[in-house]
Amino acid sequence: VQLQASGGGLVQAGGSLRLSCSASGRTFSSYDMGWFRQAPGKEREFATSISRSGGSTVYADSVKGRFTISRDNAKNTVYLQMNSLKPEDTAVYYCAARRVFRTEYEYWGQGTLVTVSS
């Protein structure tokens, strides 16, 4: 599967952005999807994930209550709604996919930059 992330940009603290990640192929619903982020000078970290059906989600403590992950399997797209953004949310955001029973994410998008100004 090939992933294409979009929607990044510059936003003021307290603002919102919605990221999208579109996937190629006809088996999108077979993949758990996740969003990761990498801030300047830091290692990539997990932000959130969603199960194949969309019925189960997981959030890192740092984004819980502010970010919402969702997916539309008919459109082969996963979304990340980011509200109440903080300067520390500044990072390149990557979407990723993994097949059932895989512990590691296997496929990665190219990343989209989110910059939050104070």
Image: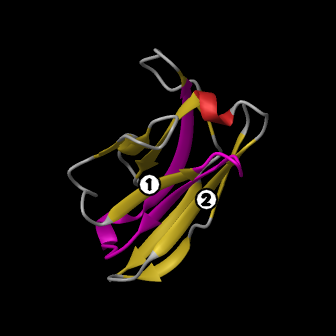
Residue labelled with disc 2: 20
Q: Name the one closer to the observer, 76 or 107.
A: 76
Measured from the top left, where is residue 107 in percent x and y?
62, 29
Q: Quadrant of the C terminus?
A: bottom left
Q: Residue at x 30, y 66 (%)?
A: 66
Residue 96 sits inside the magenta stretch: yes
Measured from the top left, where is residue 85 in percent x and y?
34, 73
Is 96 left, or right, of 35 in this rendering? Answer: right
Q: Of callouts 1 and 2, which one flags the residue occurring earlier in the amino acid sequence?
A: 2
Q: Amino acid at mark 1?
A: Ile
Magenta span of residues: 72-98
Is 62 left, or right, of 82 in this rendering? Answer: left
Q: Residue at x 47, y 43 (%)?
A: 54
Q: Amino acid at mark 2?
A: Ser
Above or below for 74 versus 114: above
Q: Residue at x 54, y 57 (%)?
A: 79
Above or below for 4 versus 53: below
Residue labelled with disc 1: 69
Q: Name the one closer to the observer, 86 or 28.
A: 28
Measured from the top left, where is residue 64 in percent x and y?
25, 57
Name the residue furthest left. 61
